[in-house]
Image: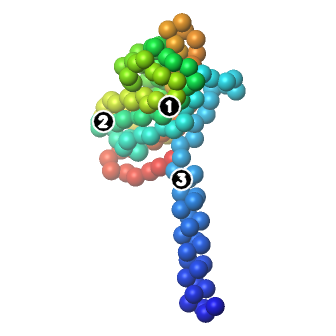
Amino acid sequence: MGAAAFRSNIAFLFLFSACLLLPSIQARKITYCTKKSYAVQVEDVVISPDPLKAGKPSTFTIKASTGQALTGGKLDLEVLLFGVKVHSEAHEICEKTACPISAGKFVLSHTQTLPGITPPGLYTLRLKMEDEKKQQLTCVSFKFQIALGESVSSI
């Protein structure tokens, strides 16, 4: 094998390895509140734009699955900065997805505009979900970035 072919193979292996690592680098780490088994498993969180921009609309898309049908319930969102709760809100699950939810995969989506005075930084969002009987369905947290202006950052 010639030197040019060897360099070409090395370059291919490097690019192939980088492509395999890229999804794991970009994946958002989701942490469950406890080690108990939850009826709803959160599989992925997509945030757009990422990082969020103060004064601009932002969307959180939660991809989840469940082994049971759900007819409704409550979704509690808490935002923490340096471990201190800075914002909380509650919504009906059926406001964020079509109900009833069949067993299997489903998506919750929440869009809002952050106040223009929102300080930039690394935040944590804690999401709790319960059914109509107040039984906890899931509890997860994940980090997200809020940037000022046109800064680019990822977690």
Residue at position x 58%, y 24% in the image: 67
Q: Quick check: can you spot residue 81?
A: no
- Could you say where residue 114 lies in the image, as x and y percent from the top left? 34, 32
Residue furthest to the top in view is: 133
In the foreground, 72 or 50: 72
Q: Are marks 3 and 2 in contact (CB under 8 Å)?
A: no
Q: Which residue is mark 3?
A: 23
Q: Which residue is mark 2?
A: 57
Q: Secondary structure at mark 1?
A: strand
Q: Are marks 1 and 3 in contact (CB under 8 Å)?
A: no
Q: Nearer the viewer, mark 1 or mark 2?
A: 1
Residue furthest to the bottom in view is: 2
C-alpha gap between disc 1 and disc 2: 26 Å
Q: Are marks 1 and 2 in contact (CB under 8 Å)?
A: no
Q: Which residue is mark 1?
A: 105
Point out the tag, 1 or 3, that comes first from the N-terminus: 3
Name the amino acid type tagged 3.
Pro
Name the amino acid type tagged 2.
Pro
Position above or below: 90 against 60: above
Q: Secondary structure at mark 3?
A: helix
Crowding near the residue tagged with mark 2, few <14, some 14–19, many ≥20 C-alpha atoms within 10 Å: some
Crowding near the residue tagged with mark 1, few <14, some 14–19, many ≥20 C-alpha atoms within 10 Å: some
Q: Is residue 51 left or right of residue 64?
A: left
Q: Is residue 3 left or right of residue 151?
A: right
Residue at position x 33%, y 50% in the image: 150
Tally of marks: 3
Q: Quick check: can you spot residue 39?
A: yes
C-alpha gap between disc 1 and disc 3: 21 Å
Point out the tag, 1 or 2, that comes first from the N-terminus: 2
- Could you say where residue 56 lies in the image, as x and y percent from the top left? 29, 38
Residue at position x 47%, y 49% in the image: 154
Numbered badge on residue 87: none
